[in-house]
Amino acid sequence: MSFRLIDSGACGAAFNMALDEALALSVKQGLTPPAVRFYGWDQPSLSLGRFQKKEHFLNKGGGLDLDFIKESGLPVVVRPTGGRTVLHGNELTYSLVSRYEGAFGGKDLFGCYAVISSAIEKALRRFGVPVEVKMSRERISRGKASFLTGEEEKVSSREDVSGRQGKKAGGTIQCFGSVSYAEMTANGRKIVGSAQRRWTGGFLQQGSIPFEIDEHLGGKVFRGAFNSEVMAGLATLVQGKSPSLFKRLLAEGFEEVLGVPLEPSVPDPQELALALELLPGYKSACF
Protein backbone atom coordinates (compact mmCIF):
# COMPACT_ATOMS: atom_id res chain seq x y z
CA MET A 1 0.00 0.00 0.00
CA SER A 2 1.37 3.42 -0.94
CA PHE A 3 0.43 6.84 0.43
CA ARG A 4 0.17 10.04 -1.54
CA LEU A 5 1.55 13.31 -0.13
CA ILE A 6 -0.60 16.21 -1.30
CA ASP A 7 0.75 19.66 -0.39
CA SER A 8 -2.03 22.08 -1.29
CA GLY A 9 -0.54 25.28 0.12
CA ALA A 10 -2.89 27.99 1.40
CA CYS A 11 -6.48 27.57 0.20
CA GLY A 12 -9.88 28.97 1.07
CA ALA A 13 -11.71 27.57 4.08
CA ALA A 14 -14.59 26.01 2.13
CA PHE A 15 -12.30 24.42 -0.46
CA ASN A 16 -10.07 22.97 2.27
CA MET A 17 -13.01 21.15 3.83
CA ALA A 18 -14.54 20.09 0.51
CA LEU A 19 -11.27 18.60 -0.71
CA ASP A 20 -10.68 16.71 2.54
CA GLU A 21 -14.14 15.18 2.33
CA ALA A 22 -13.69 14.35 -1.36
CA LEU A 23 -10.39 12.60 -0.64
CA ALA A 24 -11.99 10.63 2.18
CA LEU A 25 -14.96 9.52 0.11
CA SER A 26 -12.73 8.44 -2.76
CA VAL A 27 -10.21 6.58 -0.60
CA LYS A 28 -12.78 4.73 1.49
CA GLN A 29 -14.37 3.41 -1.71
CA GLY A 30 -10.97 2.17 -2.90
CA LEU A 31 -10.97 4.49 -5.93
CA THR A 32 -7.69 6.23 -5.03
CA PRO A 33 -4.72 5.43 -2.74
CA PRO A 34 -4.68 6.77 0.83
CA ALA A 35 -3.25 10.24 1.33
CA VAL A 36 -1.61 12.62 3.73
CA ARG A 37 -2.45 16.22 2.90
CA PHE A 38 -0.72 19.39 4.15
CA TYR A 39 -2.38 22.76 3.71
CA GLY A 40 -2.87 26.26 5.07
CA TRP A 41 -5.55 28.97 5.01
CA ASP A 42 -5.56 31.94 2.64
CA GLN A 43 -6.95 34.12 5.46
CA PRO A 44 -7.85 33.64 9.13
CA SER A 45 -10.86 31.33 9.28
CA LEU A 46 -13.09 29.64 11.82
CA SER A 47 -14.02 25.96 11.66
CA LEU A 48 -16.69 24.32 13.78
CA GLY A 49 -16.97 20.64 14.62
CA ARG A 50 -19.78 18.87 12.77
CA PHE A 51 -21.72 18.29 16.00
CA GLN A 52 -21.65 21.92 17.10
CA LYS A 53 -25.27 22.82 16.48
CA LYS A 54 -26.11 25.83 14.34
CA GLU A 55 -29.06 26.63 16.62
CA HIS A 56 -26.73 26.88 19.63
CA PHE A 57 -24.73 29.64 17.98
CA LEU A 58 -27.79 31.43 16.57
CA ASN A 59 -29.65 31.54 19.87
CA LYS A 60 -26.84 32.09 22.34
CA GLY A 61 -23.77 33.00 20.36
CA GLY A 62 -22.16 29.86 21.76
CA GLY A 63 -19.28 31.89 23.16
CA LEU A 64 -18.62 33.53 19.78
CA ASP A 65 -19.04 37.20 18.87
CA LEU A 66 -21.30 36.67 15.86
CA ASP A 67 -21.53 40.38 15.08
CA PHE A 68 -17.76 40.72 14.89
CA ILE A 69 -17.45 37.58 12.78
CA LYS A 70 -20.02 38.84 10.26
CA GLU A 71 -18.66 42.38 10.12
CA SER A 72 -15.06 41.22 9.67
CA GLY A 73 -15.96 38.75 6.93
CA LEU A 74 -14.19 35.94 8.75
CA PRO A 75 -14.90 32.73 6.81
CA VAL A 76 -16.76 30.11 8.85
CA VAL A 77 -17.03 26.45 7.87
CA VAL A 78 -18.27 23.27 9.52
CA ARG A 79 -15.66 20.52 9.36
CA PRO A 80 -16.52 17.02 8.17
CA THR A 81 -14.95 15.81 11.44
CA GLY A 82 -16.13 16.44 14.98
CA GLY A 83 -14.45 18.31 17.79
CA ARG A 84 -14.71 21.92 18.80
CA THR A 85 -14.16 25.37 17.33
CA VAL A 86 -10.75 26.20 15.84
CA LEU A 87 -9.49 29.63 14.80
CA HIS A 88 -7.13 28.92 11.91
CA GLY A 89 -4.32 31.23 10.91
CA ASN A 90 -0.56 30.80 10.67
CA GLU A 91 -0.42 27.03 11.00
CA LEU A 92 0.20 23.74 9.28
CA THR A 93 -3.03 21.82 8.89
CA TYR A 94 -2.86 18.14 8.05
CA SER A 95 -5.40 15.57 7.01
CA LEU A 96 -4.97 11.83 6.62
CA VAL A 97 -7.39 9.56 4.79
CA SER A 98 -7.01 5.80 4.74
CA ARG A 99 -8.79 2.49 4.71
CA TYR A 100 -8.20 0.14 7.66
CA GLU A 101 -5.08 -1.36 6.10
CA GLY A 102 -1.34 -1.30 6.64
CA ALA A 103 -0.44 0.61 9.80
CA PHE A 104 -4.17 1.06 10.48
CA GLY A 105 -5.17 -2.55 9.89
CA GLY A 106 -7.46 -3.85 12.64
CA LYS A 107 -7.16 -0.65 14.68
CA ASP A 108 -10.03 1.12 16.38
CA LEU A 109 -10.43 4.86 16.86
CA PHE A 110 -7.82 5.05 19.60
CA GLY A 111 -5.38 2.88 17.67
CA CYS A 112 -5.60 5.08 14.57
CA TYR A 113 -5.17 8.19 16.71
CA ALA A 114 -2.08 6.70 18.33
CA VAL A 115 -0.44 5.91 14.98
CA ILE A 116 -0.95 9.45 13.67
CA SER A 117 0.09 11.03 16.97
CA SER A 118 3.30 9.02 16.90
CA ALA A 119 4.25 10.54 13.55
CA ILE A 120 3.50 14.07 14.77
CA GLU A 121 5.41 13.47 18.01
CA LYS A 122 8.51 12.37 16.07
CA ALA A 123 8.41 15.55 13.99
CA LEU A 124 7.89 17.80 17.00
CA ARG A 125 10.77 16.27 18.95
CA ARG A 126 13.12 16.60 15.98
CA PHE A 127 12.01 20.20 15.63
CA GLY A 128 13.05 20.78 19.23
CA VAL A 129 9.65 20.91 20.94
CA PRO A 130 9.49 19.45 24.50
CA VAL A 131 6.36 17.50 23.66
CA GLU A 132 4.20 15.46 26.01
CA VAL A 133 1.48 13.07 24.80
CA LYS A 134 -1.70 12.40 26.77
CA MET A 135 -2.34 8.64 26.78
CA SER A 136 -5.20 8.49 29.31
CA ARG A 137 -8.76 8.33 28.00
CA GLU A 138 -10.84 9.65 30.88
CA ARG A 139 -11.91 12.83 29.08
CA ILE A 140 -13.60 11.00 26.26
CA SER A 141 -14.59 7.63 27.71
CA ARG A 142 -17.97 8.96 28.90
CA GLY A 143 -19.43 9.20 25.40
CA LYS A 144 -21.04 6.22 23.73
CA ALA A 145 -20.56 5.19 20.13
CA SER A 146 -23.58 5.99 18.01
CA PHE A 147 -24.60 5.41 14.44
CA LEU A 148 -26.04 7.86 11.96
CA THR A 149 -28.51 6.66 9.36
CA GLY A 150 -27.73 6.82 5.67
CA GLU A 151 -24.24 5.38 5.40
CA GLU A 152 -23.66 3.52 8.66
CA GLU A 153 -21.15 6.13 9.66
CA LYS A 154 -19.44 5.42 12.95
CA VAL A 155 -19.37 8.42 15.26
CA SER A 156 -16.65 8.11 17.84
CA SER A 157 -17.05 8.73 21.54
CA ARG A 158 -14.41 11.42 21.13
CA GLU A 159 -16.58 13.29 18.63
CA ASP A 160 -19.65 12.77 20.77
CA VAL A 161 -18.13 14.26 23.89
CA SER A 162 -16.11 17.05 22.32
CA GLY A 163 -18.82 18.01 19.87
CA ARG A 164 -22.17 17.36 21.52
CA GLN A 165 -21.17 17.74 25.14
CA GLY A 166 -18.46 20.36 24.95
CA LYS A 167 -19.58 22.16 28.09
CA LYS A 168 -19.45 18.94 30.14
CA ALA A 169 -16.12 17.85 28.69
CA GLY A 170 -14.13 20.90 29.57
CA GLY A 171 -16.31 24.01 29.70
CA THR A 172 -15.13 25.45 26.40
CA ILE A 173 -16.16 25.44 22.77
CA GLN A 174 -12.52 25.93 21.75
CA CYS A 175 -10.60 22.91 20.49
CA PHE A 176 -7.40 24.20 22.07
CA GLY A 177 -9.13 24.68 25.42
CA SER A 178 -8.84 21.01 26.42
CA VAL A 179 -6.59 18.02 25.84
CA SER A 180 -7.88 14.58 24.86
CA TYR A 181 -6.36 11.16 24.20
CA ALA A 182 -3.15 11.13 22.09
CA GLU A 183 -3.09 14.92 21.82
CA MET A 184 0.09 16.84 22.58
CA THR A 185 1.20 19.60 24.89
CA ALA A 186 4.48 21.41 25.52
CA ASN A 187 5.17 23.08 28.85
CA GLY A 188 1.54 22.42 29.76
CA ARG A 189 0.16 24.17 26.65
CA LYS A 190 -1.72 22.41 23.87
CA ILE A 191 0.09 22.48 20.51
CA VAL A 192 -1.94 20.12 18.28
CA GLY A 193 -5.71 19.75 17.88
CA SER A 194 -7.20 16.83 15.94
CA ALA A 195 -10.54 15.20 15.16
CA GLN A 196 -11.43 11.99 13.36
CA ARG A 197 -14.43 10.73 11.40
CA ARG A 198 -14.85 7.03 10.70
CA TRP A 199 -16.84 5.15 8.10
CA THR A 200 -17.19 1.43 7.56
CA GLY A 201 -14.63 1.59 4.74
CA GLY A 202 -12.11 4.08 6.10
CA PHE A 203 -11.51 7.27 8.08
CA LEU A 204 -10.51 10.92 7.87
CA GLN A 205 -8.44 12.70 10.50
CA GLN A 206 -7.86 16.44 10.43
CA GLY A 207 -5.47 18.36 12.64
CA SER A 208 -4.24 21.88 13.31
CA ILE A 209 -0.63 22.64 14.33
CA PRO A 210 -0.25 26.42 14.92
CA PHE A 211 3.01 28.26 14.33
CA GLU A 212 1.70 31.48 15.86
CA ILE A 213 -1.37 32.32 17.96
CA ASP A 214 -3.27 35.50 17.07
CA GLU A 215 -4.31 36.55 20.57
CA HIS A 216 -5.97 39.79 19.43
CA LEU A 217 -8.19 38.12 16.84
CA GLY A 218 -8.91 35.24 19.18
CA GLY A 219 -10.08 37.64 21.86
CA LYS A 220 -12.44 39.30 19.38
CA VAL A 221 -13.87 36.05 18.02
CA PHE A 222 -14.36 34.38 21.40
CA ARG A 223 -15.70 37.48 23.22
CA GLY A 224 -12.55 37.99 25.27
CA ALA A 225 -12.62 34.39 26.50
CA PHE A 226 -9.72 33.31 24.30
CA ASN A 227 -7.13 31.93 26.72
CA SER A 228 -3.78 31.95 24.95
CA GLU A 229 -2.08 30.58 28.07
CA VAL A 230 -3.48 27.08 27.42
CA MET A 231 -2.10 26.86 23.86
CA ALA A 232 1.15 27.60 22.10
CA GLY A 233 2.44 28.02 18.57
CA LEU A 234 5.65 26.30 17.50
CA ALA A 235 7.34 29.66 16.86
CA THR A 236 6.95 30.46 20.55
CA LEU A 237 8.49 27.16 21.63
CA VAL A 238 11.29 26.92 19.09
CA GLN A 239 13.17 29.99 17.89
CA GLY A 240 14.76 30.41 14.47
CA LYS A 241 13.34 27.34 12.71
CA SER A 242 11.17 27.54 9.62
CA PRO A 243 7.70 26.11 9.03
CA SER A 244 9.06 24.42 5.90
CA LEU A 245 11.51 22.45 8.04
CA PHE A 246 8.70 21.24 10.28
CA LYS A 247 6.64 20.23 7.26
CA ARG A 248 9.54 18.12 5.99
CA LEU A 249 10.04 16.53 9.41
CA LEU A 250 6.34 15.72 9.62
CA ALA A 251 6.41 14.01 6.23
CA GLU A 252 9.39 11.95 7.42
CA GLY A 253 7.55 11.07 10.63
CA PHE A 254 4.58 9.79 8.66
CA GLU A 255 6.82 7.73 6.40
CA GLU A 256 8.44 6.04 9.39
CA VAL A 257 5.19 5.30 11.20
CA LEU A 258 3.24 4.21 8.13
CA GLY A 259 6.16 2.11 6.90
CA VAL A 260 5.83 3.35 3.32
CA PRO A 261 7.20 6.31 1.37
CA LEU A 262 4.94 9.29 0.76
CA GLU A 263 4.69 9.85 -2.98
CA PRO A 264 4.35 13.57 -3.90
CA SER A 265 1.05 13.87 -5.69
CA VAL A 266 -1.96 16.01 -6.49
CA PRO A 267 -5.65 15.18 -6.09
CA ASP A 268 -7.09 12.84 -8.70
CA PRO A 269 -9.35 14.61 -11.26
CA GLN A 270 -12.30 12.67 -9.82
CA GLU A 271 -11.48 13.94 -6.36
CA LEU A 272 -11.23 17.53 -7.57
CA ALA A 273 -14.54 17.21 -9.39
CA LEU A 274 -16.18 15.86 -6.25
CA ALA A 275 -14.66 18.65 -4.16
CA LEU A 276 -16.20 21.21 -6.50
CA GLU A 277 -19.58 19.49 -6.11
CA LEU A 278 -19.26 19.65 -2.32
CA LEU A 279 -17.96 23.23 -2.30
CA PRO A 280 -21.33 25.08 -2.30
CA GLY A 281 -22.38 23.22 0.83
CA TYR A 282 -19.29 24.40 2.67
CA LYS A 283 -19.65 27.95 1.37
CA SER A 284 -23.17 28.34 2.73
CA ALA A 285 -23.25 30.41 5.90
CA CYS A 286 -23.74 28.34 9.04
CA PHE A 287 -25.14 31.32 10.97
Image (cartoon, rainbow, N blue to C red):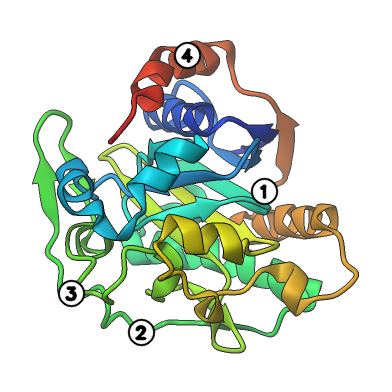
Between the residue at mark 1 and the residue at mark 3, the CA separation in whole angstroms equals 40 Å
Real-space CA distance between mark 4 and mark 3, rounded to the nearest whole angstrom: 37 Å
* Label 1 vs 3, first from the N-terminus: 3
Foreground tag (2 vs 1): 2
Residue bearing the label numbered 2: 136
Q: Which badge, 2 or 3, comes first in the chain's sequence?
A: 2
Residue for badge 4:
276
Q: How far, Cα to Cα, is label 1 from label 4?
A: 30 Å
Work out whether residue 123 or residue 172 is closer to the camera in this orientation and state it: 172
Q: Which residue is mark 1?
A: 260
Find out whether the residues at labels 4 and 3 contact each other: C-beta distance under 8 Å. no
Q: Amino acid at mark 2?
A: Ser
User: Crowding at label 3, few (<14), some or many (≥20) Cα neighbours within 10 Å?
Assistant: few
- Report if residue 74 is visible in the image: no
173 lies above or below 48: below
> For numbered disc 2, what is the local secondary structure?
loop
**Mark 1 Cα shell of 10 Å, populated few (<14), some (14-19), many (≥20):** some
